Image (cartoon, rainbow, N blue to C red):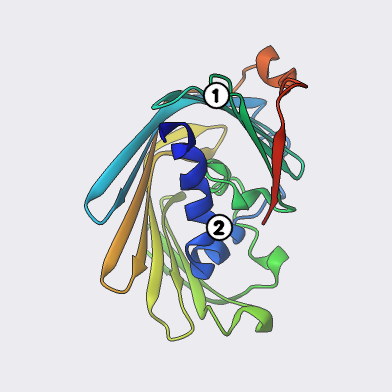
Amino acid sequence: MHSCIFFVRILCIIMKSNILLILILSFGISLSAQAFKCLGADFEKINTERAVSDTTRGKIYFQLPSTMHIKVEYPVNQLLTYDKDKFLIYYPESEQAFALYSSNPMNIPFFSSIISVVKEDFGLSDLGFTMSSNVIKGDTLVAEWAPPEALKPVISKIRITYDKQKLILSQTFDAKNQMVVYTAYENHFEYKGYYFPLSVTTHQIIGTSDNIEQIIYTNPQFELDFPKIARQFKIPKEVQIKELNW
């Protein structure tokens, strides 16, 4: 049962709500190659739903433009890698493997929390969003983005808030202008003029329910070589890979 905890959690994040999917898709991937060489960090990911929490811990490595390797150490031994459009999930102990395909890495957990601050507009303009307002009060900047016609039936706007150049809040509103997802970014780590949040807490509001996901990064390092084990990662030939699209 526990062998599929993290995999099931990923599918829940992707499939639970179209609004959440739109929020994740809103983070851009057109990144500056000078931002960092390879980012490595320890992480703790806590999901709370209906007062029940589960925790995942491990290490994550990210190399521009879109290569990621995750080693889950708790509650199960699990390896995950993303490159181009393929996300591989492997459980060495049970010899289970899954391949998920997507043309947009922002469907993948962790990407948005690591990368969103590198792209000033979250890539929203690339997705057809247009800035509808831009208000500056002291050190705080609040920008609102209107969606393209295709997304208006499900989303009315995305609001992004910065404080002293640090991303601190993103909010997504449904077609009825009700806030359905908001993410708070805290404990920023400055590197080359970019501010990476080491604590990212996302609330997904469904009716009266508030589902919470918190990711905490520790020991961030930005000038690593992408680990050899990640570069050479392959699922053993004898293991059957179950393929899924989303």
Left or right, residue 123 beside residue 159:
right
Q: Is residue 25 above or below residue 133?
A: above
Neighbours of disc 1 within 10 Å: few (<14), some (14-19), many (20+): few
Judging from the image, what secondary structure is the residue with disc 1 in? loop
Residue named by callout 1: 94
First along the sequence among labels 1 and 2: 2
Give the quarter of the figure containing the C terminus.
bottom right
Marks 1 and 2, how far apart in space? 30 Å
The x, y position of residue 219, in whole percent, is 43, 21
Q: Residue at x 61, y 52 (%)?
A: 107
Q: Would you identify the image quadrant in which residue 61 lies?
A: top right
Mark 2 is surrounded, within 10 Å at the Cα level, by few (under 14), some (14 to 19) or many (20 or more) other residues, namely many
Q: Is residue 21 left or right of residue 141?
A: right
Residue situated in front as seen by the camera: 117 or 51: 51
Image coordinates for residue 70, horizontal then vertical, percent? 56, 28
Give the quadrant of residue 124.
bottom right
* Above/below status of 32 relative to 141: above
Q: Is residue 169 visible?
A: yes
Residue 201 lies, in percent from the top left, at 36, 49
In the rendered image, the vertical position of residue 139 relative to residue 39, given as above or below: below
SS at circle 2:
helix
Horizontal side of 137 relative to 111 (left or right) equals left
User: Amino acid under label 2?
Assistant: Ile
Q: Nearer the viewer, residue 50 or 133?
A: 50
Query: Pointer 2: what residue?
Result: 24
Residue shown at 47%/33% (left/top)?
190
Residue drawn at the location 51% of the way across and 46% of the way down:
10
